[in-house]
Each structure stands twice: as structure tokens, then as C-alpha cells.
Image (spheres, rainbow, N blue to C red):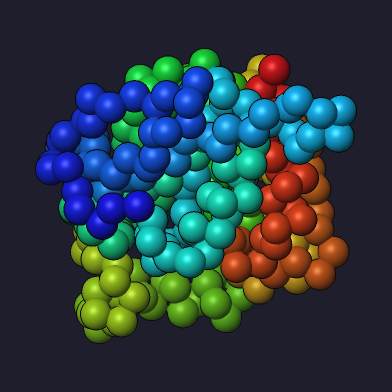
Amino acid sequence: MSNRPAGHGARSPVRPNYETGRQGPIRTFLRTADGIPIDSVYDPPPVVYDTLPDAPRTASRDLVFVIAHGFTGDVDRPHVRRVAGVLRGYGAVVTFSFRGHGRSGGRSTVGDKEVLDLAAAVEWARGLGHARVVTVGFSMGGSVVLRHAALHGGTDAVVSVSAPARWYYRGTAPMRRLHWLVTRPEGRLVGRYGLRTRIHHRDWDPVPLSPVQAVPEIAPTPLLVVHGDRDGYFPLDHPRMLAEAAGGHADLWVEPGMGHAEHAADDALMARIGDWSVTAAG
């Protein structure tokens, strides 16, 4: 995978060659609707030839996963690459860095304007020829995939892992630390220089649609809500609120012993998410 961007706003003319499997990853910068360059990577599905009855399952050629990482993550973080590697066994994968993260431009709005980043990545995935798109988000990214599905649509299934149900939650020590990081000048300095995350200093105005408000608008698109029973950021009332708001339309997986987001989502869980996605996206 090259570390060299194709240029701000560039969209590679190269298309994946599914017949030979020779086309490798593509890295480029996408341009969002509000003009932010987003560092993005496309990994085509591996080619597996099913010539024997016990041959390995072939990754779907028309399915693509678009992964929305958690706050302070980026496309090059090992935990993001690991998740992408597991899901690539089921289809192509698009990963990207949210605004203010990694090499992407702009500053993080902690889940508000990030919906535009995901929209650009989904559009790119469709443009690469994939008929089925599944968005998979973690923590902040989990809230973004919910709001994107409600506001923009264009996905065939949605997976939200370790997401909050409501804004401004401060009921756990990690969330109180996160609020300090986002709202205080000294916290934003720590974010910039310690966590490679540039955070916008302005408050939300207006306050965006919350995840729990977004969920009822997602139907009939299949939705999976995944949460660990040892999540240190958001207790179990958050995923239960999301599932209840879906009115029976969502699948809820409460994972025993699981902590928070990508770091806690082991390969076995990601494989189950891959299996669910293949079925749910039709």
C-alpha cells in the first residue's frame, strides 16, 4: 500500500480487475461536499478459486465494506488495518481518515460533519463498481454510520459498534476525559500533538441529529448494533436505546467480555460481522 496520496480531490482512474486479481490497493484523497480532502484507501477483494469442494470461501466481488474508525484513529492505525484485513475476506474494503485525523484535512467535529467524510467514501466505493455497500463504524464512527444512513442513505446494510446513543454523555471517566480533550484549549493541544487529531474549537450549532434519533430513519436498511458488556465508555443502556429506537428492525449483539471499539473487536467478532453483512446486504 503506497503512502503517497494521489493529490487533493484526486480520484484514481484505475479500476479493480476482478478477473485476474492483479489490481492492488489504491490510495487517494477524496473531496467532501464541504471541500475537505480525506485520505482514503481501497483494498480490492482477494481472488480465491473455488475449484474443489472444500476450497476456501470466495470473497464477494460486488460487496464493499466502508469502515468508519473511532475518534483519534486513522487509516494507518494498526487496529484499523487489522479490522480491514478481516473484512477483506468477505469483500472489498474502503478505509479512510476522518477530517482532522491522520493526513486528512480539516479539523474534527467529533461526529457532526464527519457524515460528509463517510458520504464521500461511500460514493467512491460505488464508483469503483460495487453493487452492495456495507458501512461499519466504531465508537464515533458508529454514530456516524447511523446518521449517514438516516440522512444520506445509499447503503445496503449498516453495522454500528460501541456507539453512543445520545450526545454529551459524561457518565464514565473515559468520557469525562474525552470531553476535556474536546472542550478545553489544553485538551485540544494534547489531541493535536499527542494523538494526531486536530479538533475544532467551535461548539455544535445547530446540535446534529443524535444517533438514537437517526435509527428510526434507517429502516428498511438492515442494521446491526454491537456492544461489549465491559465497554468503559458507554454502558449497555446506549445499545439498548438504539435497538429499541429501531422498533425491532435492528439486530443487537451484546458481546460478553468485550471492551470498546476496534481494539476490543477481535478477529472472531469481525468474522461474524462479515458473515452477517453478506447475508443482510442481500
- At horizontal 47% and vertical 47% (from top left) the residue drawn is 68
Q: Nearer the viewer, residue 233 or 53?
A: 53
Q: Image quarter for residue 26? A: top left
Q: Is residue 240 left or right of residue 261?
A: right
Height in image: 223 above or below 176? above
x and y, in percent, of residue 219 in the image: 65, 21
Height in image: 21 above or below 170? above
- At horizontal 54% and vertical 35% (from top left) the residue drawn is 45
x and y, in percent, of residue 243 in the image: 74, 40
Height in image: 248 above or below 159? above
Q: Nearer the viewer, residue 110 or 253?
A: 253
Q: Is residue 133 left or right of residue 191?
A: right
Q: Can residue 209 be seen in this view?
A: no
- At horizontal 49% and vertical 44% (from top left) the residue drawn is 67
Q: Image quarter for residue 88? A: top right
x and y, in percent, of residue 54 in the image: 86, 34
x and y, in percent, of residue 241 in the image: 71, 46
- At horizontal 47% and vertical 54% (from top left) the residue drawn is 69
Q: Is residue 159 visible?
A: yes
Q: Image quarter for residue 34? A: top left
Q: Nearer the viewer, residue 129 or 161?
A: 129
**Quadrant in the picture for the C terminus:** top right
Q: In this view, does 23 lie to the left or right of 66?
A: left
